[in-house]
Image: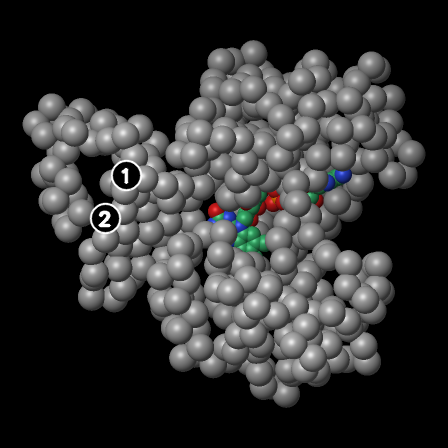
Amino acid sequence: MKTYEYIIIGNSAAAIGGVEGIRTMDQENEILMITSEPWQTYSRPLISYWLQGKVKRERMQYRDPSFYEKNKCEIRYGTMVEKINKKNKTLQFKSGEIVGYQQLLVATGSAPFVPPIKGLPNKLKETKNIFTFTKLEDVIGIKDILTEKSKIVILGAGLIGLKAAESMVNQSKSVTVVDLANRVLPSVLEEKASVIVQKHLEEQGINFLLETSIDEINSMKVNLSNEDKLSYDILIIAVGTKPQCELVKDAGGEIGFGIETDIYQKTSLENIYAAGDCTQSFDISSEANRNLAILPNAFLQGEVAGINMAKGKAKYNQAFPLNSVGFMGLYILSAGTYIGEEYEVKTQEGYKKLFIKDHRLKGYIIIGDSMRGGIYTDLIRQETDLSTIDLELLMNSPQIMAFNQSSRKEKLSQSH
Ligand SMILES: Cc1cc2nc3c(=O)[nH]c(=O)nc-3n(C[C@H](O)[C@H](O)[C@H](O)COP(=O)(O)OP(=O)(O)OC[C@H]3O[C@@H](n4cnc5c(N)ncnc54)[C@H](O)[C@@H]3O)c2cc1C
């Protein structure tokens, strides 16, 4: 049995952050990376753009192909880790092979949640026309059968469901999004913003059936809760994702809304760290533990874990939700939590809303021109006391002049 100084389960944002974190401290010891997928690291948010024909496969790479060699990483593609044995510090693969680790990073991400629906096979892979929408493999399968005559039904009006809709609306006969909620992007936006986004997508040809669910799937048709039937050629299940915590849970680790870690990304198990979509983070905007399944969070947590695994000292204690996303030309930037007093301004393309509590910016939504949204993100991250800031100017024209002189100096020195 071979023992590695570092093993990382995963090959996506958190795992890559892990490698880069380790290499800031230790350029010598070998790293073993293990991934159940067959591909080099790619940027998951780009899968819908590839399906749409907007990006080529080469442009989806999250790191250059030479990354593994340059960073002395051995990579095992298409390999499933089945068990962590914390006592012996070993991992067991599905093939039965066992490898040893000194330090382990679990960066297993999230998996699509598939609700129990009558007629939906247990294994989606056994069907030809029903897909989830989180992996490159999913969109390759969809592309194989998608034609201009395809009728697409998507269950879920969240970010992933709408990205799927956007990618297919101009290369199919129809796209219908079904959701039990009464508005689109219910976990990302508040009501007013949801209405703007829905209207925009309807104008581009996407149909919505809200406050509706799929009761049964039968002979290429879905039976809806409103008693209607809808035929489909491709059915996408996009109702959300769940953190993949099982390996750590089975090894006896603490699990909350994901794998629990401390601010050094260490789990409750000795020599085992975790990062990315599989973890629970402390959201500084809502002051609560949450599963924050967003890419920057995954990378930064991975990097912090890597530094600490290689005997450095780094912490990650500034997590909060942050979404920057475009749908058919309409841009949305949102961050934090929508609590406290609301301040709203109408802008040419949409609107902007800030949420302020106890003199701190807790969250914001910008629909349309999101150019200077970074300033708001920074205010949330730094938990800046807003009594030092010209609020009126910050609302309408968020540039550096909105800060008082000492804050301005501080900001300018940070940017160099
Ligand atoms: C369509 C889509 C659009 C998105 N858009 C955005 C966006 O606009 N902005 C944003 O911030 N985020 C977006 N996200 C979310 C973002 O992609 C994730 O937050 C990010 O990929 C998380 O990275 P991760 O490394 O934690 O996990 P993942 O990307 O889920 O990777 C997990 C890795 O673990 C491996 N793995 C898991 N279990 C095992 C096992 N037992 N054995 C071996 N290998 C295993 C997998 O093969 C994979 O390599 C989007 C996601 C999707 C699907």
Q: Is residue 312 visible?
A: yes
Which residue is rendered at x = 51% and y = 13% of the image? 312
Helix, strand or loop status at disc 2:
strand
Mark 2 crowdedness (10 Å alpha carbons): few <14, some 14-19, many ≥20: some
Which of the pair 320/193 is nearer the observer? 193
Name the amino acid type tagged 2. Tyr
Is residue 8 depicted above or below 397 in this figure? above
Residue bearing the label numbered 2: 343
Q: Position of residue 226 (x, y in %)?
A: 65, 77
* Residue 356: mark in rendering: 1
At which x and y percent is residue 241? 64, 49
Q: Quadrant of residue 319?
A: top left
Q: Mark 2 or mark 1: which comes first in sequence?
A: 2
Q: Residue furthest front?
A: 226
Please provide percent x and percent y for residue 220: 77, 80
Identify the image quadrant of the N terminus.
Answer: top right
